[in-house]
Amino acid sequence: MEQVYEWDPNVIVLLPYNSASVADILADPAWQSLPAVKEKQVFRMPKYLMSWELPVPESILGTLWLQSVIYPESVSFDIKDEIKRFYQKFYRIDLSDEDVEKIFSDNTQIILNKPKP
């Protein structure tokens, strides 16, 4: 915690397998003085088949997602459409809008769909 206070972050990104949720961080008195918590700039990195921060093909989605939440004014793409295109192109998985919303939730459960033949 001392190191986090030293960094004094404006944004906090939790990894998908972190035991604390976004709500936990926002409610914890120990975090309240940090700018990221004051401004509610605490996010959980999404994952689907794999966590988007790992060195896997899906990591490109992590980069796009991070840009869309930290610098939304500089984004000229729809992150939801990019996610759907990525999984269709590389894994032949058709995601619904509901599937994408689940990916964005603060829930780390993995949702597997079987590719269509």
Image: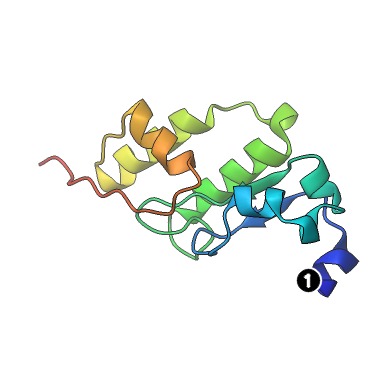
The quarter of the rendered structure image containing the C terminus is top left
Q: How is the image coloured?
A: rainbow
Mark 1 closeness class: few <14, some 14–19, many ≥20 residues within 10 Å: few
Name the foreground residue: 64 vs 35: 35
| Image coordinates for residue 111, horizontal then vertical, percent | 30, 48
Judge left or right: residue 75 versus residue 95: right
What residue is disc 1 on?
A: 1
Q: As rendered, which of 3 and 91 lies closer to the eye?
A: 3
- Residue 113 against residue 17 in the figure, above or below: above
**Looking at the image, which residue is at 82% across and 72% down?**
3
Name the quadrant containing residue 25: bottom right
Task: Please tell me which residue is depicted at 50% across the width and 49% down the height of the picture.
Answer: 46
Q: Along the horizontal axis of the image, is 4 left or right of 44? A: right
Q: Amino acid at mark 1?
A: Met
| Residue under the point 47% across and 31% down | 80
| Residue 101 place in picture, x, y as percent | 43, 34
